[in-house]
Image (tube, rainbow, N blue to C red):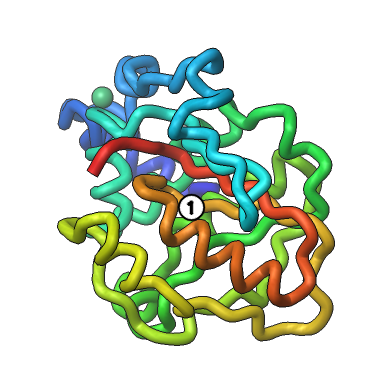
């Protein structure tokens, strides 16, 4: 939520929209409208819903394309933290029904070095908004136990190797079922490795859900 002085500042100096660069809001209504929702009928049986041994379901809500892509990149790489709020609202607006039974929400973790550099983990910010909307707790305990290279620019096999064994559950008893949250889903390697760590900690069912999904 914005502090009162931030609201006042926004009135005097409206921020540039991350999508269209006009001085309006962080992400203007026209750009939100343009965020292409992945059509429901595409979901079952397509590459976007991949039931498998580790993940009960894994999918993205919106197409990873302009203007959403620009907004996510601005959040992560230009550290425009306040974009987490409109992006979280987009996430919440597209929550599928089948995740309602999950006991807790877990964010895909960053390695502590990267989180320190960025100042925040965008997936944690999104996970908190999703959890609030669902009335579920955010469970902390999943950690990225070794630094990994950026997945961007790596092919499928390299992505898989890059994140293999990179995650571990470092807390007490894990929830029975988990909604795993990430900002972007591409090959699913990261989600799969997180699910592997969660399952090893005793989680029975993991549903992976990302704000955006697209080709790489
Ligand atoms: Zn815009």
**In the image, what residue occupies the spot 79% across and 83% down?**
172
- 118, 176: nearer the viewer: 176
- Name the side, left or right, on which 114 lies relative to 129: left
Residue 77: x and y in percent read: 23, 59
Residue 194: x and y in percent read: 55, 66
Q: Which residue is label 1 attached to?
A: 182
- Name the side, left or right, on which 131 lies relative to 115: right
The mark tally for this picture is: 1
**In the image, what residue occupies the spot 65% across and 29% down?**
96
- Name the side, left or right, on which 170 lies relative to 5: right
**In the image, what residue occupies the spot 16% across and 31% down?**
21
- Location of the C terminus by quadrant is top left
Ligand 1 image-quadrant field: top left
From the viewer's perspective, is residue 33 above or below residue 3?
Answer: above
Give the quadrant of residue 26. Answer: top left
From the viewer's perspective, is residue 134 above or below residue 187?
Answer: above
Instruction: Give neighbour class at mark 1: few <14, some 14-19, many 20+ (Cα, 10 Å).
Output: many
- Residue at disc 1, secondary structure: strand
From the viewer's perspective, is residue 105 above or below residue 21?
Answer: below
- State whether residue 192 appears in this view: yes
Residue 51: x and y in percent read: 61, 41
**In the image, what residue occupies the spot 70% across and 68% down?**
199
């Amino acid at each position: 939520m914005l502090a009162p002085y931030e609201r006042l500042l926004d009135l005097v100096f409206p921020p540039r929209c991350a999508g269209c660069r006009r001085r309006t809001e962080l992400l203007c209504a026209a750009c939100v409208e343009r965020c292409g929702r992945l059509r429901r009928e595409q979901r079952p049986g397509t590459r976007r819903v991949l039931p498998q041994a580790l993940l009960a379901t894994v999918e993205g809500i919106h197409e990873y394309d302009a203007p959403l892509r620009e907004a996510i990149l601005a959040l992560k790489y230009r550290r425009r933290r306040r974009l987490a709020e409109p992006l979280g609202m987009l996430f919440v607006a597209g929550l599928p029904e089948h995740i309602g039974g999950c006991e807790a929400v877990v964010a895909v973790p960053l390695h502590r070095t990267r989180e320190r550099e960025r100042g925040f983990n965008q997936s944690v910010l999104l996970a908190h908004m999703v959890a609030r909307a669902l009335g579920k707790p955010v469970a902390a305990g999943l950690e990225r136990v070794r630094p990994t290279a950026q997945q961007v620019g790596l092919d499928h096999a390299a992505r898989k190797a890059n994140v293999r064994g990179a995650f571990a559950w470092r807390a007490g008893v894990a929830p029975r079922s988990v909604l795993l949250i990430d900002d972007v889903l591409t090959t699913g390697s990261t989600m799969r490795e997180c699910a592997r760590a969660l399952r090893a900690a005793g989680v029975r069912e993991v549903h992976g859900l990302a704000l955006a999904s697209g080709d790489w």
